[in-house]
Amino acid sequence: MREIRQALLAADVSYKVVKDFVRDLSEKAVGEEVLRSVTPGQQVVKIVHDALVELMGPVDHTIHWASKGPTVILMAGLQGTGKTTTCAKLARFLKKKGKHPLLVAADVKRPAAVEQLKTLGGQIGVPVYSEEGGRPPMICKRAVKHAAANGQDVVILDTAGRLAIDREMMDEVRAVARKVDPQEIFLVCDAMTGQDAVNSAKAFDEELALTGVILTKLDGDARGGAAMSVKAVTGKPIKYAGLGEKLEDFAEFHPDRMAGRILGMGDIVSLVEKAQEAIDQEQAQEQAAKLFAGSFDMEDFLGLFDQMKKLGSMKKVLEQAGPGFAQFTEGMSGEEMEKEMARTKAMILSMTPKERYRPEILDVSRRRRIARGSGTSLDDVNRLLKEFKLVRKQFKQLGQQGGIAGKLAMRGVRKRKKRRMKDLLGKGGLPGELGGLPDSGDAAGRTRGRRKKKKKKKRR
């Protein structure tokens, strides 16, 4: 229990919440029957995980749509929590769901807030309503009428924030709520602020009839303990989470994934979902098939780099994948990892297409040329080829063991053979650069045969 308490405090969970949680958990864990296949420690971790999910749940991503006229969503929060950006992210998210949102610039206090929202609206193709010199409650009221007249079915109000809770801000937000009677009032909280997020959530909850919370900056160093604290203090469901700086880094909140993150177990499910959106599935399947068949070449390796880059920083990807992968980032900054990837990519780009397709032909002279061309050393090139060969061998063995990997490999091989034969028949010849098929009987194949005979004669 002491280790659990330390882990929760390290994840920025409120001390009072941790104290109550550990007390309740101790009562629940004592007397629990330990399963045969796990240790008591593992059993406790499972109990903790389930309790965290229960505390941050239940899952509720629903929005109460207005029966008549546009649905109004009021966004409240302190300055610096990413409220304006979150308004644009939510608008983009709802637009992908088939809605027609309207963004309203009701933050007339912060310099450039209106221009920022207009810029973000332009990037996602969502109109922005703004007025010069008006009062926020009346701006919002006229914006709702404008939305109804122009066919927009969702109105997202970006209200003013302050660096700290003050009476003027609260009065203004409550005045806006009275004028437009929103269906949803979302509090935007910065997950990086930890204890301060709890204090601001409590203050807003006392003044406004909050219907949900949106956590931002969950891609930062904090493990997300604010999620546990905010839910425990307000009792309001956490609806969505901001997972990065880009407008597409926005998703529905899942308590089970956050529980794993708080306990340091990573968030592999979110990573997989992000990969599904960013990566070309057909290309990924083909690369996986070639990998398990042992025919993965340097050209595929290069394509894999481009695919991974779509997921963002390699360091963040490995950390999100969990402790088993996070170990590769130890003692290495994100910038250093990116540099290492750039060096590897430079070495592959310094190879000819034939060398990428058949790395086994890389003799010492070719390796020296690659090192000069990529600005690296011969040792770097040797290390790359050695690691590449080892990875290819291991995956080939895995593919030969059968199961899903083996089936995937064989299916990929058959598809590749059919496609290649079709390409060759269409071109009326075989590509000499790649060497053609082994049993093709083409000119390139005969040439290789003659070369082998000459080598044998020399050896004799």
Image (cartoon, helix red, strand yellow):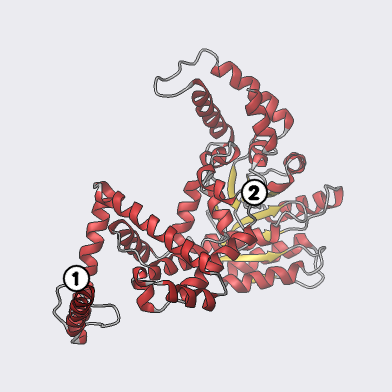
Is 88 left or right of 179, judged from the image as shown? Answer: left
Quadrant in the picture for the C terminus: bottom left
Mark 2 or mark 1: whose residue is earlier in sequence: 2
Looking at the rendered structure, the kind of residue marked 2 is Leu
Query: Which label belongs to residue 336?
Result: none
Query: Which label belongs to residue 215?
Result: 2
The residue nearer to you, when weighing 321 against 151, is 321
**Rendered location of residue 50, percent (x, y):** 51, 30
The residue nearer to you, when weighing 349 against 147, is 349
Q: Are marks 2 and 1 in contact (CB under 8 Å)?
A: no
Quarter-wise, where is residue 352 in the image?
bottom left
Label 1 Cα crowd, 10 Å radius (few <14 / some 14-19 / many 20+): few
**Rendered location of residue 36, percent (x, y):** 40, 19
Location of residue 440 with respect to 204 vertically, above or below: below
Is 176 left or right of 332, judged from the image as shown? Answer: right
Q: Secondary structure at mark 1?
A: helix
Seen at 64% across and 41% down, the residue is: 227
Query: Which label belongs to residue 418?
Result: 1
Quadrant in the picture for the N terminus: top right
The residue nearer to you, when weighing 393 against 23, is 393
Looking at the rendered structure, the kind of residue marked 1 is Lys
Quarter-wise, where is residue 353 in the image?
bottom left
Location of residue 335 with respect to 458 vertically, above or below: above
Q: Secondary structure at mark 2?
A: strand
Is 312 left or right of 430, judged from the image as shown? Answer: right
